[in-house]
Structure formats: C-alpha cells, structure tokens
Amino acid sequence: MPNLFHENEFVFNVLFEAVSEGVIVVDENQTIVATNVAAEQMFGYSKDELISQHLNILIPPNYHTAHSAYGGHYETFYKQSSARQMGQNRELFGVRKNANKFPVEVGLNPFKIEKKKFVMSIIIDITNRKKSEAKINELNNLLKDKISTRTIELNNTVSDLKKEIEKRVKAESNLKIALKKEKELNELKTKFLSLVSHEFKTPLSGVLNAAVLIGKYTKSEMQDKRDKHLLTIKNKVYYLNGILNDFLSIERLESGKVKYKLSNFKLSKVVNEVVYNANMMLKSGQRINYPLNIDNLNIYQDEKIVELVLSNLLHNAIKYSPENTIIDFKIKFKSNEFIFEIKDEGIGIPYEDQKHIFERYFRAENALTNEGTGIGLNIVKGHLESLGGTIEFKSVRNQGTTFIVKLPLIKEK
C-alpha cells in the first residue's frame, strides 16, 4: 500500500469506523491492506492478524478456486473496474477464525491511489436474514400441507385457511419491505464510501505532491516557493478537516449527542470572522456586501452553530458564483427573530432539483463538477431545526440563489 495510505491512517480509520458493516480493502494481489473493527469482530481476528494476509483467510477453503486470481470474481472485477454487488444469483460465505462458516453479502467498490488499484469490500453478515427466510419457507410448507389434508373439510375450514393465507402474505410483504430497506441502506453506504474516496483522494494527493516539492527547495532564497507549497498543504488539510467535521456532525445529529452551548455574544464578532475567512476564498472580481447596522446587535444562541451556518452559505455562494459577481449579505432583526439573507449571482439550482437540495449526499446536476460532499446544507438544516430555526431559499437557474435563515429570539436565562 502506498505511503499516502499509511500517512493518513487516522483519516481512513475515522471513515471505516463510521459504518457498522465490515470493510476490507485489498490490493491487486488480493492482499488485505486495511480493515475496520466491524470486520475484525465479524471474522474473529485482530487487525494485526489480517493485515498483509491473502483474502483467502476469510473465505472457506472449498470456495478458494472461485476467488483465485485466474477467472475468479476479483480478476473479472478488476477488469470491469465498476462498483457492483458480488456473487449475484449465488450464495457467498465467509469463514471465521474458529473455522465456522457463515453467509455474507458483499458489495465491491474500486478505487485508485497513486495509479495503484484497490478494492473496498462492504461485508454484511446475513445469518439472521437466512434464518428469517428459512422460517418463512417453513411456514409456507406447513400451509401447503394443511391445505392438502383439509380439502374434504373445506367448507368448515375456509375461515381458518383465510387467516393463514393472510399471515403468509403479511410475512412476505414485511420481508420484502425489510429487504428493500436493507438494499437501499447498503446502496447509500456504498455511495457514501465512493464519495469519501473521491473527495479525499484529490486533496491527499495534493498534500503529498506539495510535501515532495518542499523537499527540493533547500536553499534559503527559495523560502517563497516553500511557503507556496506549505500554503497548499494548509488549505488541503483545512478542507479535509472540514469534511471530517461534517461527518462527525451528522453522527452527532443522528445520535442526539449534540449539546448546544447558548451564550450572549455580539453578532458582529461572528460576522467579521465568517466574512474574513470567506474573503480568502473569493474568486477574481468577487465581492461580499457586508451587512449594515449590526454593531450593536447581541444574540443569545450557540455561537459555533451560527458561525457554521453562515460560513456554509457564504462558501457555497462563492463556490457556485462566477468571477466579477457580488454576494449580498444582509441581517435583519425583528421583535421575535433574526433573519439572515445571503444572495448570490451564481449558477442557481435547477427547478427539478430544488425539492432534494437539503437531502444528504444530494448534489444538483449543474454542480457535480464542483468539489463537495452534498452534506453541508443537510447539516445546516438539522442544526437550525434543533435550535427552533428555519432555512429556505429562492433560486433561478443561471440567475442566482438567495438563502434565508431565521433564528428565534431566545431570552437569556
């Protein structure tokens, strides 16, 4: 595995441990290069026992031929290089350290680091699902036997038979719903890992390249060149840290672990910080209209969340607006609420995408070429709703977007 992977082990550990399914990463030789705790617990090994081992350690011996490098699943998969479900229309099994075999479902996702190919496998233990299916088959067989033996008593048993059929239909319907939800969840997590792999690969490569170039400028008069690459590293790390903070925010919001710290602070303090940071991201000719008459405004809220919300919206306005445009930032105060309004002259949000804009991982079709994870607005909306606030927008494609945030006026206790 390239140095890049080891040098950023913390980043990848955070991502791997964010999912409850087992994650195994192998290289072109089917050598295990990375695992998460869920995979280690599933198979009964420690991380040290798995790293550098061949993938066959997790596959029952009688399945090794099918997984061999010649003609097996992984060889075909490397040639196709596309994310897909492994072993469709056939049963797959894993084997634990204690030699116990168990049924699994495996999703495969390819990626490259420094031109070297790897495959990320998402592994789900489906033992309980198989037991449920067996139980339903058992119920079906019992039902068939009962029908055949009670034919002569049909008139007396119609009512009972109807109840049995209804139970069967309900059980099958519930199973279909459960399987559909499980499939959607697996697809969402596969999409999540694909997204993360893409979003982290480019800035991490930039960090590595900048670090290599710094080493070449050894003379004192080359400090300006060293500073340039150090700034690149700083910006890339800042971007990666932002992504990690977004993922942690999602986890806290879902688990209800967010503890808001309300305090009384000057609104201009946060606005100055947010605008200062945003100014460093401005494109050529872009300008932010600073909000007027806010010097004497105090607000009792969670300062960090207000900063997060405004930063996200300002950064989006800059990112999705062309050069030589104005971003209008306004703040209004009413008797019962604060209103923040950020208007840009950017690409806008297509009408057909507007209903999905706050959904997690969603990105409008005209924004796919811009970097981003599609979770920022989802996080902003979650925090605002938790604090009793709202967010809405007005947008026309190629004419710009206006986001309006409303926060209730809370009296200090």
Image (cartoon, rainbow, N blue to C red):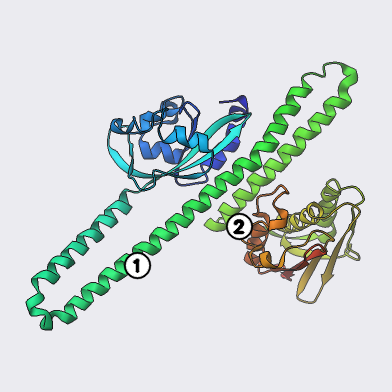
How many numbered marks appear?
2
At numbered mark 1, what does the secondary structure look like: helix, strand or loop?
helix
- Residue 25 position in % (x across, y down): 49, 34
User: The residue under label 1 is which amino acid type?
Assistant: Ser
Of circles 2 and 1, the one toward us is: 1
- Categorize mark 2 by other alpha carbons within 10 Å: few (<14), some (14-19), many (20+): some
**Residue 219 in the image, given as x and y percentages of width and height:** 86, 16
Q: Which residue is mark 1?
A: 173
Q: Which residue is mark 2?
A: 360
Image location (x, y in percent) of residue 15: 56, 42
- For image coordinates 66% across by 69% down, the residue present is 388
Which amino acid, by three-letter code, is at mark 2?
A: Arg
x 35%, y 66%: residue = 174
Q: What secondary structure is marked by label 2?
A: loop
Earlier along the polypeptide chain: callout 2 or callout 1? 1
User: Is 57 situated left or right of 352 in this image?
Assistant: left
State the separation of the CA atoms marked 2 and 1: 28 Å
Does residue 57 show up?
A: yes
Label 2 with label 1: CB-CB less than 8 Å: no
**Which residue is rendered at x = 79% and y = 52% of the image?**
319
216 vs 134, left or right, is right
Q: Nearer the viewer, residue 161 or 214?
A: 161
